Amino acid sequence: MPSAEIIAIGTEILLGEIVDTNTAYIARALRDVGVNLFRTTSVGDNASRIAEAIQLALERAEIVLTTGGLGPTVDDPTREAVALAMGVEVEYHPELWEQIQARFNRYGRVPTENNRRQAYIPMGATAVENPVGTAPAFFVDQNGKVIFSLPGVPSEMEYLIERSVIPYLRQRFHLKGIIKARVLHTAGVGESVIDDRIGDLEKLVNPTVGLAAHSGQVDVRITAKADSIEEADSMITKLEEQLRHRLGKWIYGADQETLEGSAMQSLEKHGWNLVVVEAGLGGSLIRRLASLPGPFLGGEMLSFQTAEINLSTSLRAYHQSHQANVALGVRLIPGPEKQDIQMIIITPEGERNSTRSYGGHPDYASLWAVNLSLDLLRNL
């Protein structure tokens, strides 16, 4: 399988002004056709630094994809950077200028003279028409290596990936295999415990198993490389059976399934509805429950002063006023070295009160508390 690297271009990415979503999209597209991706890079709008990043990527990979820097302004240097990396000049393509003018005409606009810059591409490059935007893309295919330069506008990049880049790479590198992934979500257990249970499976070569820890939950990723979707699915299914056997009820879902969805399913299974009283979470638990259809009747946010009086009293009053089957009260209590979470749950089977401590970064305490609360609901 060939390998690839992605270079996201834009000073605004490095300054944190925008989030680079293009890299994730391209990574998934490459994965699905069996291209290995080992590195991604972000570079500011500087031609020499972009050229250096491209040259380094070409030393390690057969495919390099850049996004961004193809606009009409002075700080859109990707065309010049690719030319610099390849040791050539940029050259003017009148047919590209005609395409750009036609595109502007369709939008009822007139291109300015600086838009003519977009009709220049590196010598030896092949232009790729962009029917959904004004910036032409291009690629260079030399010495067994391919560079694709794509617009940074996500909708334009996605269109060209699906209709131009992937079909070309399939033919150019005789891509027949695929890489497919499945993510199992766990809650109620730490990463070290999971690693202790499945450490031997994490050493497999194909399919592979990897862990990603979050606040209050851990993801287990299965990735399989195969010649067909059917073969990849079979490999993943066999390994997933082992993981589910070892991790049991800690697994609450897979892929797009959510912890709040699992909590709702648990309530529906019992035929119960739910109300929530929370303090110190900023309404995040209420919002996540309210985002799904189901037996959630509503929630109340207490001020911290009110919550310090008596969470139990507030919860019982809210429980009775809504005639709910289940009432969950959650309070996050900040401290100098750790955060405490108080959870009270009232069900038709009785009342339970517990306190847990969190010693991680304070910014993640609220998410940890919400996930812990949802895990409590799903295990009713």
Image (cartoon, helix red, strand yellow):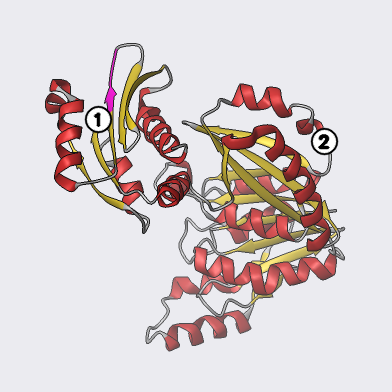
Which residue is at the front of the view, 91 or 308? 308
Q: Three-letter amino acid code at disc 1? A: Gly
Residue 41: image x %, image y %? Answer: 62, 44
Left or right placement of residue 247 versus residue 303 in this view: right
Mark 1 or 2, nearer chain start: 2
Q: Which residues are magenta?
A: 331-335
**Which residue is at 64% across, 67% downward?**
161
**Residue denoted by label 1:** 280
Residue 38: image x %, image y %? Answer: 73, 43
Which residue is at the front of the view, 270 or 58? 270
Q: Three-letter amino acid code at disc 2? A: Leu
Residue 205: image x %, image y %? Answer: 84, 38
Q: Magenta part mainly helix, strand or loop?
A: strand
Query: Quarter of the image containing the C terminus?
Result: top left
The image shows residue 331, relative to residue 320, as above or below, that is above
Instruction: Please tell me how crowded label 2 is: few (under 14), some (14-19), or many (20+) other residues with Cα within 10 Å.
Output: few
Q: Quadrant of residue 170?
A: bottom right
The image shows residue 361, relative to residue 301, as above or below, that is above
Residue 119: image x %, image y %? Answer: 58, 74
**Which residue is at 55% across, 56% downward?**
22
Please, what secondary structure does the residue beneath circle 1 have?
A: loop
Which residue is at the front of the view, 98 or 65? 65
Mark drawn on residue 46: none
Assess whether residue 333 is covered by the magenta stretch: yes
Instruction: Please tell me how crowded label 1 is: few (under 14), some (14-19), or many (20+) other residues with Cα within 10 Å.
Output: many
